[in-house]
Structure formats: structure tokens, C-alpha cells
Image (spheres, rainbow, N blue to C red):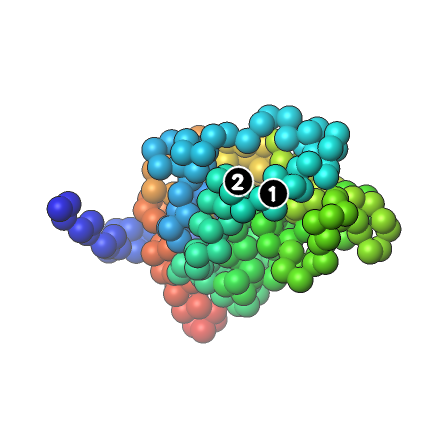
Amino acid sequence: MAEPSTPFQIDDALDAEVRRAAEVLSRARSVVALTGAGLSVESGIPPFRGKGGLWTKYGEPPLDGYQRFLEDPAESWRKQLDPKEPWARALRDTLSAARPNAGHRALAELEGLGRLDCLITQNVDDLHTQAGSRALAEIHGNYTLLRCTGCNVRFPRAGFPIDREQLPPVCPECGNVVKGDTVSFGEPIPADVLQRCFDAVERADCILVAGTSATVYPAAGFPVEVVRAGGSLVEVNPEPTDLTSLATVHLCGPGAVLLERLVHHVRALAEAA
């Protein structure tokens, strides 16, 4: 049996860097955060690619998934509702079993302290909402929601009336076809979410990046835009990324531990002010 991994410890040198990051956030006029799959992994959700990844095990979704949906939304819904469909079942079971970790809770607390104006996440797992974040832009959607393809109104998936004999379901507001809120391959990011991201990034003079190497656009461009406009970048990742050279402070380690400690310092600075 493998030995249990040693819990991550913050030494004095790293703690001094965490405090410096807290000072950067505390001085900022407007802070936006960007999170990715790394934070979800710390809640037990496997990545999509690589060893143990969902796509590695069950196959990658088609790159023209959205076009296929538009061509035959009823068939897409039949596959989604099929209890024998391994990909849909595996994703649903994995996400429903996950719970927010200390990193999710820390970001929600930063918002509550008035130190985070918008949280942009590439994750679809609903964990930021469960942790209490409200100023949230889910750029790739949320698996617990459905979205109208016409008016973009979102509905909780649980309890939405779906008649398996009359697929696809339609929007009670405008009558257009309803799909899952998660963004499929080939599907444009919903305009309302994208605009919310652009507005938040334009206002921000500090961006906190956690659990993502930020290589997928448009999210990858947000930290660069903040830095290009003269703002600060605080990065929290277990390994250096392409963003590290741009970072005002780079905190190397797991997001759950470091974000929790970051909030501790932000709170202490606010109390001392």
C-alpha cells in the first residue's frame, strides 16, 4: 500500500509571500478572480484529459457537439437522458458527489469581505455557488442548470418539466429549444456571461488566478489584459505556468490551502486598518 501523502505545509517564507499577496489584494480598487480545473481536482473531480481523466476513460465529446445538437436536439436529449449512456452518467455521478473545498469557501469569503468583485470560473461543477459565491460568471456554464438557446434564460435542471415523449424541451418564456447550460464544443460562450467577464476585467486592477494554467481562450486573455492595463496578478498554482512570469506574486502549492491562508491575511489586514 502506498504511503499517505504528506499534508502541504506553509513555511515562513511562503507565508510571507501569501501575506504580500494579501497586501496586493487589499490595496486594489477592484479584484477579479479566475479559476479552473485545478481547484475542482482538489474536491475529487478528475480532470478531463490525462491519467484518470473522464475523457480518457469514456471518450472525448465530439468537436462539433453543438452543431449536432442543433441538427437534432431531440436525439441529443434522448442520449442525455439514457441511463445507460456511460459518459453522461459518469459526469453526473462525479459532479453530484463533489463538495466545495477550502479554496472555494475562501473565494466566497473574499467576496463577503468586499475584496472580490467578480469570480470567473471555467468549471461547470457548481461548487463555487455551493460555497456561497454570488458575483459569479460561469464561462462554460453550470451542469445543474438548463439554458434557453433563444433568450438565454436559465432554469434549475432539477424540477424542470421534461416529457420524454415530446423532446426537446422548450423554454416557457419564449418557446425556443432548451439545452444544458454547459457549453458544448463548437458552441459560442453565451453573450451575457461573456459581457459580464469583459466588464469585470475592464474594471479590475488586480486579478487572482487559481487552479488554472489559463491556456484556453477567452479566459486565457483575462489575466494578460489586467496586467497590460497596469494591474497586478496574483497566481496560485501548484506548478509554474505561462502566467508566472507576469505575476506580481506567485504562490506555489494547492489552492485550497493557500487561498484559505490568503483570506486569513486579508482579514487580518482589514481588522488592523
Residue most toward the right? Answer: 174
Q: Are marks 1 and 2 in contact (CB under 8 Å)?
A: yes
Quarter of the image where one finds residue 16: bottom left
Q: Is residue 67 visible?
A: yes
- Residue 27 in the image, given as x and y percentages of width and height: 52, 57
Residue at x-position 20% and y-position 49%: 5
| Picture layout, residue 271 above or below residue 71 | below
Q: Is residue 195 visible?
A: no
| Picture layout, residue 272 above or below residue 252 | below
Residue at x-position 50% and y-position 36%: 214
Residue type for callout 2: Glu
Q: Which mark is residue 85?
A: 2
- Residue 243 in the image, given as x and y percentages of width and height: 46, 34
Q: Which mark is residue 80?
A: 1
Quarter of the image where one finds residue 100: bottom left
Sequence-first tag of 1 and 2: 1
Residue at x-position 56% and y-position 60%: 129
- How crowded is the residue under tag 2: few (<14 C-alpha within 10 Å), some, or many (20+)? few
Q: Who is closer to the viewer here, 132 or 177?
A: 177
Residue type for callout 1: Gln
Real-space Cα separation, disc 1 to disc 2, in angstroms: 7 Å
User: What SS does tag 1 mark?
Assistant: helix
Residue at x-position 38% and y-position 31%: 50
Q: Who is closer to the viewer here, 41 or 93?
A: 93
Is 273 displayed left or right of 15 in the figure?
A: right
